[in-house]
Image (spheres, coloured by chain):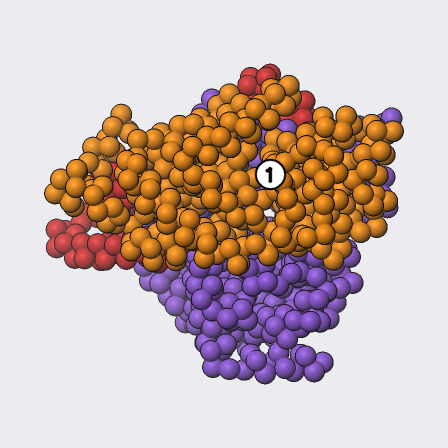
Amino acid sequence: MKSRLSTLAVAVSAFALFGAAGAVQADYPERDITYVIPFDPGGESDVTARFQEPILEEILGVGVNVTHRPGGGGAVAWSEFQNSAEPDGYEIIGVNIPHIIGQPIQRSDAGFETDDWEIITFFHSTPNALIVPEDSPFETLDDLVEYARENPEAVTLGGSGTYSANHLGALRLEREADIDVTYIPFSGTGPLPAALEGGHVSGIFNYTMLGVQMEDNARVLAVASEERVPALPDAPTFKEQGYDIVGGAYRGVAAPTGTPPEVIEVLEEAFAEANREITEKQEPLGFVMEYITGEEVDEVIGTLREAYGPILEAAD
Amino acid sequence: MEMLLEALASLMTFESLITVLVGVSAGLLIGSLPGLTATMALAVLLPFTFSMPPLQGLIALGAVYMGSIYGGAFTAILINTPGTPSSIATTFDGYPMARQGRAFEALAGATIASVIGGLVGVAFLLLLAPPLARWAVAFGPAEMFWVAMLGLTLVASLSSGSLLKGLLGGCVGMLLSTVGVSPVGGETRFTFGFPPLQGGIELIVALIGLFVIPELLTMAAEGKGALPQGDEFGKGEMRISRVARRVLGKPVNLIRSCLIGQIIAIIPGAGGNVTSLVAYNEARRFSRDPDSFGKGNLDGVVASESSNNVMVAGSMIPLLTLGIPGAPPDAIILGVLLLHGLRPGLDLFTETGVLTNGFILSMGLAALMLLPVGLLGAKLIYRVVIKTPYYFMVPFIAMVTMLGTFALRNSLLDVGIMLVLGTVGYFLRLIGIQAAPIVLGLILGGIAEEGYVQTMLAAVVDPIPWLRLVSNPLSKVLAGLVVLGAGTALLPMWLERSGRLRKASSGEEEKP
Amino acid sequence: MILRLNTDIAAGGFGLAFAALLWLPRGEMGRLSIIFPRAILVLLTVVAVALIVKGLVRPGDRRIEITGSPRRLLVVAAGFFAWWVAIGQLGFLVSSLVAVFALVWYLARVAGPVSLVRLARWVPIILGLVVAFYLIFTQVLNVRLPTGLLI
């Protein structure tokens, strides 16, 4: 009932504003766009959106309002978006992998589905990185694996959240290297540097950004990307060291299902241009810029769902 | 030293001074609206700082932070609603003072205490950051569990009247904190199949509901405003110099509260939410007249407000040296530092020392600016609150509260949760369950759970897992403090209960 | 209004009811998620039972006092909830204008009947303040307030 009422409301107001609903797409965009970030202000998703905001406004010629709707690791905003956002291109939302893959598998009442929207693009990724304190006995990844093999569950790896990109990365390391470690979830990236420096965990499985941030007092043993990350040229990849682990978090943006393709195209180009303009600021922080659009989106989701699905279901 | 002078010089420009002034005023305004927190104030400011040079951007953020933490005291004193969680303890004595017609004394005392607290925090940050930073990392999961337990011993002193009812409130608060996604395990809990509840019950939503709604309902039922017409502002008894003498005349209280504020500020995660409660509790414990607390003792206001303003600069110690945000608003400042290519670490104090010291000094400047801006603002807000008839106050406070609650997470459901908790809270207050223990439980529940479960996880290889909780020297000390704290809080209560039962129960009836 | 009520038993009863509400859905959770809430639930039950026992043996307060008019209390509380529902359906601006005006009128009646002239004089004040807050939140703080059917 409620959504029907608001549909009506939007239809009425659109009619009043533009005369006819059909004319809306032709000159998209004509009014301000709402860009929902499903996390707290100050996080990576937020900061990136704040960077994109002025560039998007310049390209699109309308205001772009970043608003926050945190809760449930993103799920609250995503379920609300899939239930009530209008497919007219004036409401878009940040989406993150693996959250949108993991939560619907993991929770009975996540309230949203992995595919029930049009993902415009994934604009960057942050590969996982395995980081140990400077005074750690583990000089290389092999040291750690060897020790873990002899002492199952004794190696503790901190990370951000349960069934997050970090957790899944740690679980993949267990599979690939055939070892048993103890993953300890923390609430977000914030407390991880303290856990590492204080020696409360043997290492942390987090993102490349933290590796960059802690360069002076920690060692990055491996990075889960195809090639070395520009901001961490000395850190080897897992692949180089013989473990097929590539993964991390992807950040992107989605519009509701049924949004006209022309609108998606406009947004896709705007985000790509924004990405090019902020590369200089984001790359040194450890981000890897991506330009994943159209069918590649499905490919990325498909591959990762295959990689994570069995792990998630086994753990359930 | 040279660097400090250079930093000071870079501050003494027209733009910097204006930035601090505007920042403090804006922060004060936002902080004094229930629901709008320091975190929110910083988030609103964030996009504007991108267009500023790094130092100016940081100055603006520091000033807004300082102003908004202080602004929380206004509503705490005038309408019994902490504008930010860090001023919960200010309500305990500030509001009774206002009801006695001593609102200005409370506001002026809070202002002076905030200025001193702010300056002390800056001094700590400037002089002792590196050695204190080492402290911050000592707090692992087990230690955090004990910190939360230590906080819970406050229930004993927060529950005026009945300890059992206080404990009950604490338990309810802790259970409310478990609604949503579990911190370890990632499952949804107590959502009753309703997806929007995955977001859990946000602390501020509960805080506003439990404090402000009962107050509004009481005003509506009584058919009159809560505050009497007080003395004319800043005259006679109310002269600022008199209040200043009273505050400064008790240096021990100030020093103790500032030290407590600083120690708690560097414990990552505990943050400013509990500093004022702990400082208030200790002020009462060491007072010669503990019974006067909660009935309008200026010392209580001073303890609370000085400690929470120490926290502003104090929590920057782990942030600037190690990149660990000590309190939630710090996460935003960390983001800004990184955006400007400033990596937390000791380099920040040497290589880019002018910038860092400029930022730190600007917070001191912001603290000083609180004095004129705060007193002026206090005067204005006081006048508005006193002169406005109650039938305008109730609907408008309700509206601002709903707006603030909504704005927190853009959630209409949160507004509903706020109203439900508030209405239930009114009736709970009638039967002797106060809001403070519930909120305390909500703050500490998450910390306790995460610490406990993480410790147990790390201890899977140990023969007796729970021994991990007391395996480090620091965790042993903290555990000892918990026992000691609970003991000293319970013992007098027990004596009173067994010996003077009549008296204890009559004290209970005095509460509104 | 003064009600006779054993507050210890009432508080204990509330604790038990709250514990029961959360006890039921506890079953399907994993070990790591339930360990803490379960401990607190047990503690809450113990405290609640202790309160009830104390209430029977050595009761504290045996009466509660609602100062002022209980009817006004309930009407205003109900008014807040109606306002909240209206925000979702009609939008923030319109429902707040109506709700604030209605509440001001209702509460002002305590001192006696409110003349039409006085009501008319409030209109610009209420309109101005509500619109001002609406604009501050939507334009300055960038909050997207609910719109519903109207605004």
Query: How many numbered callouts?
Result: 1
Can you give x and y, in whole percent of width and height, for residue B138 in the image? 78, 50
Give the residue displayed 67% in from the left and 73% down from the top. Answer: B353
Residue B351 sits in quarter: bottom right
The foreground one among A59 and B303 is: A59
Image coords of residue B476 (percent x, y): 84, 43
Which quadrant, please, contains the N terminus of chain B? bottom right
Going 81% across and 37% down the picture, which residue do you hit? A142
Q: Is residue B409 toward the left or the right of residue A189 in the image?
A: left
Is residue A97 shown to the viewer in this render?
Answer: yes
For chain A, what colour was chosen? orange
Q: Mark 1: which secondary structure?
A: strand
Q: State which quadrant residue B506 falls in.
A: top right
Residue matched to label 1? A248
Rendered purple, the chain in question is: B
Q: Please give the name of the residue rendered at 43% of the width and 27% of the height, measured from the top-left corner.
A: A115
